[in-house]
Image: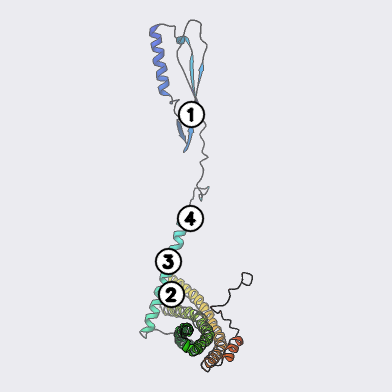
Amino acid sequence: MTTERQGPVTNGSPEDDDMFERDLKEMLDDGPNLGDASSNVQGGVPTRMSASYTEGAVTPGSGLSQARLTRSYTMPPATSNVPLSSGSQSNGDFVPKSITQAASKIESLKEWSINTFKCTKQFLSERLGKGSKTVDLELEAQIEVLRDTQRRYSQVLRMARALTNHFYYVVQTQKGLGETFSELAQKSPELQEEFTYNSETQRSLVKNGETLLGALNFFTSSVNTLCNKTMEDTLTTVKQYEMARLEYDAYRTDLDTLGLTSPKDSATLNRLEAAKKKFEEHKIKFERLRSDVGIKLKFLEENKVKVMHKQLLLFHNAISAYFTGNESMLDSTLKQFNISLKRPNSDKPSWIEQ
């Protein structure tokens, strides 16, 4: 849009000059300030207004009063190309992602609340003896045996660790005693032979004790892996199975309750169909976890027998060889089970060997 405003042409009289100056001042006041970067908003988009001056012909001797001054204002065309924010649509329908995510979270929270309520109700009913419970007698007996076995193995592990710790301090005491005997043998010539003999005996006991400590550490490490990792992994699956069983019974009870309702209107039928769908989902999950528990219990029993057969043989042979003073048998026992010892005074392997 272009607007023009033209000032009058004067003859040079004082009154005309004053009138011309007033008209010029009004004309400048009406327009934008040329010293500022003025802007106009069209269609929600900031635009600039440009101003230009056109100077007409000036007659000789007339001065500024005879100048024809034309001022033009040029407005950029209005545009409607306003950038759309991300996520908006061309038809004007805009659904922010935050609203969609909030609706999804609310729906998940609602489903979780309903599931928790049903499971809590089923759990309390079973505890009070009012609700029915799905029981697999054979599987439940195997699970109870596993839990009892883990408790007993944990007790063995605790006592084996205590034995290892106490024996470690015995070996350290023997080591210190042998060093003391060796020092006294050098400072007591009259008892040098006796002190030397006892010093060598303690050093031999320390060597055999370190060998036995290696066997005990290997035993406790293997039992710890079996008890706190292998068995615990199976018991974790058992917990998932028990939770799936509780959900299965909760939705089974809910389905039975809806099936006993007398009115068969559309709302009741829809609820019954939804309950059947949920029941089938939890039934599939329950049967899958029951199968997983059975398989894991079978493999755990086989693995337990193999591991404990090896570890109990090691423990027996190492203890017997040490306390009977059979050093060769003690060393052969560790070689038999591929146990490598790291002696305190042994040379550190090079970086190539590492």
Mark 2, residue position: 264
Q: Position of residue 85 (x, y in %)?
A: 50, 47
Q: Position of residue 263 (x, y in %)?
A: 41, 75
Q: Amino acid at mark 1?
A: Met
Q: Amino acid at mark 2?
A: Lys
Helix, strand or loop under label 1: loop
Mark 1 or mark 3, which has the lower sequence index? 1
Real-space Cα distance between discs 1 and 3? 55 Å
Q: Residues within 10 Å of mark 2 (few under 14, many from 20)?
A: few
Mark 4, residue position: 97
- In contact (CB < 8 Å): disc 2 and disc 3: no
Which quarter shows the C terminus?
Answer: bottom right
- Which residue is at the far bottom? 324
Mark 4 or mark 3, which has the lower sequence index? 4
Q: Nearer the viewer, mark 2 or mark 1?
A: 1
Q: Is residue 343 above or below residue 82?
A: below
Real-space Cα distance between discs 4 and 3? 18 Å
Mark 2 or mark 1, which has the lower sequence index? 1
Mark 1, residue position: 49
Mark 3, residue position: 109
Real-space Cα distance between discs 2 and 1? 73 Å
Q: Amino acid at mark 3?
A: Leu
Mark 2 or mark 4, which has the lower sequence index? 4
Q: Residues within 10 Å of mark 4 (few under 14, many from 20)?
A: few
Q: Is residue 15 above or below residue 129?
A: above
- Which residue is at the far front? 190
